[in-house]
Image (cartoon, rainbow, N blue to C red):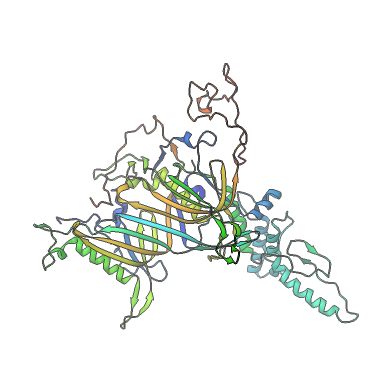
Amino acid sequence: MPVFRSAFQSYRDETSGQGKRPVIFDILGPDKATSLLPDGLKMVLHVNPSSMRITHAKQTDRVQTRGGFVEFHWGNITQSLSFEQATGGFVRLYTGLSNRTTPGGRRQTIAYQKYLDYMALFHHNGSIYDRAGNIVVQGYVKVTFDGGVYIGWFSGLTVEESADKPYQFTLSSEFTVDYELHVFRSQPTEQASTSALSAPEVATSVLDPLLGF
Amino acid sequence: MAGASDYSSLTAGPSTGLLYEGPKARAVDGTKKSLRHPVYGSPFTLRIVPPAPLLAALAGRGEVRVGGAFDAVLRQQRAAVEAQIVAGTAPAAAVEQLLGTRANVTPGFAIIDAALSTTTNFRQSQEYRKTVSRNLLPGSASPAPTLIGGNGKRLTDQKQAPGNEPALADLRQAQSILRQVAAMQAAPPLTLLINPQSLSLTYAKKQVYQERNRNGLIFQAWGEEQVQLAVSGRAGAFYTGALKPEVDEQGKTSSTSGVQWASRRDSATWQNFSSLFTFYLSNGLLHNPDGSEAHLWVGNVEIRYDQFIYWGNFDTFNFSFTEEQQGGVIDFDFSFTVSEMMDVAQRGPVLPQKGPTPSPSTPQQLQPTMLPSGTSPGTVSGSPPEVATSILDPFL
């Protein structure tokens, strides 16, 4: 039995009924539908990002004329995701938190290995290379989080190691979104009253995915 | 309060997909509804407004039905001809006129009528040109075929040039316009459960005071820029009630409850926020059914607040998830450019304000919620008659 666990076992944690919502990464082919990863394999992080910011913008050109403003509506310009995340602590069996950089140190920890997986995904970015290093086929990276699907590519990654936050790396990622899909749940909303919810509430197990506990 | 799927018929453009599924928990609105009462509160309400020329047509004609935009007779005729084509028994004329066929029904929008007629027009316009060419020869006059102009009216005068009227050439686009306008009309107005935290209006003059001549600087006044609205706000806590309170021995349940992240998608807060996001994605545009960004028409998004009406379109929309707010509170912000701004406030002297909650010191404040059911202000015996607040807001 593993002593150390990641916050998530697999991408299936989202439907396990335990209230977990991992951020799931996948690689898609140029058709935006076919996964290039083996069946049943998707990437989840050691811990979820500490924040995700989704930005949208419309492109509208406005020209003033004598009769008023003429607006040219071009639709959407690039949408983006910005992640702020941490690797999680570099913890080794028997010795605990490790910041040793020599062999047998922090690089042999789950958190560091997951960080390397994330780096590999960033470098791959959905691209298929030939022997000369040229990109011959360009696919997509797919990010899924709790009902939202964002298909696009990584555009930037910053890794920071600071004495203020020992035993971990702080990451900042930028993701350019080409297509997004949202699955909304809908129902008429009940107005809360003192007599509502007569049955005692049974709390679901609260496993905060964002904190990785 | 409307659910998120009440706006499911609004189009979002080619780069965004919206799907709707049933609930897995009960959405509960814990906010104080009286604070957004349309008369005694301070609601922040949005609405999608169809394009003005189409609105005028709707006001005058009313052919656009909320329940469906298609002409049932057109479908029947089309289906009948298609069946004949499949069977190989369709006459050639019927095949050519397939898309232009329309039974005796009240015409809709003129340019959309033209879309239905254009395919017929093409063949007949060719015949018309041939006829004109033949008629140039002495003694060879022959009757020109009847044409349907771009305004849907039959042209009987041979001197009238066909095709000079503006027209849609694509029936699919015409049907899409009707469908999207009906969806805009059917979408209920959206009132935010929690008002924005900040709202700023930016007014800017367009003027130049830099060019010089020998007598000094020259002032050039070009009017004003469009008003910019910058709004930032917060959605509330993710709070739901369980649909199925059963929990198995492993602590798993198929329904969430309480204040937690897992309740987010079913919560009233998220439904309200996702409806606002849908308004941004729609932006009042009639999107092209071919998936391009060549929009068919541009309408408006209407924001009503503080007895002002703002018509315009969104420019940006941002929101974020953070670990410090796992139980709710989505921070969002958007910018909005105003095309038209209307003040619908009541005119008159400054009068004492009626508060949202009853007070013994103001006995004339009879709120509807205080009255016994079945009564209305002014009918409660022994009470002073309600001083009605004239509601000038046509929307209400």
Q: Can residue B176 be seen in the rendering of this structure?
A: no
Residue placed at 71% from the left, 49% from the top? B60
Residue placed at 79% from the left, 73% from the top? B128
Q: Position of residue A205 (x, y in %)?
A: 26, 44
- Viewer-nearest residue: B126 or B377: B377
Left or right: A98, with B58 as reference point: left
Specify the farthest residue to the left.
Answer: A94
- Viewer-nearest residue: B124 or B178: B178
Specify the farthest residue to the top.
Answer: B382
Left or right: B96, with A8 as reference point: right
Residue placed at 31% from the left, 40% from the top? B246
Left or right: B235, with B372 as reference point: left
Q: Position of residue B191 (x, y in %)?
A: 50, 43
| Quadrant in the picture for residue A152 | bottom left
- Viewer-nearest residue: B180 or B307: B307
- Viewer-nearest residue: B31 or A172: A172
Q: Where is residue B333 in the image (x, y as percent from the top left)?
A: 43, 51
